[in-house]
Amino acid sequence: YDKRVRPNYGGPPVEVGVTMYVLSISSVSEVLMDFTLDFYFRQF
């Protein structure tokens, strides 16, 4: 096992599913077009 090498090395690409959960959107500034977003990713 070598953690530096992806699974199925030399074969087809490995598909990875990712979900992004948005927890909150705050500090919205329409003038600066800026906002703060709290989120986390889930990989499966």
Image: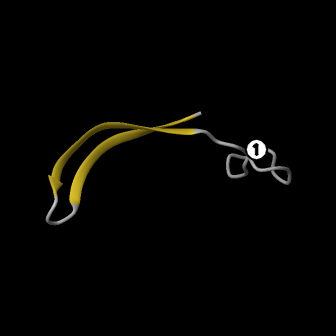
Residue that lies at the very extreme toward the front in this rendered image:
30
Q: Regarding mark 1 in the picture, which secondary structure is present there?
A: loop
**Which residue is found at the position 60% from the left and 39% from the top?**
17
Quadrant of the rendered structure where residue 41 is? top left
Q: Which residue is mark 1?
A: 7
Instruction: Where is residue 2? Give x, y as percent.
Output: 73, 46
At x 16%, y 60%, the residue is: 30
| Callout 1 amino acid | Pro
Q: Is residue 12 above or below residue 1?
A: below
Q: In the rendering, at what x and y percent does residue 14 appear? A: 73, 45
Q: Quadrant of the C terminus?
A: top right
- What residue appears at the point 17 percent right and 66 percent down from the top-left corner? 32
Identify which residue, 1 or 23, lies in the foreground.
23
Eyeballing the image, is 44 above or below 27?
above
Q: Is residue 41 left or right of residue 4?
A: left
Given residues 44 and 2, the one toward you in this image is 44
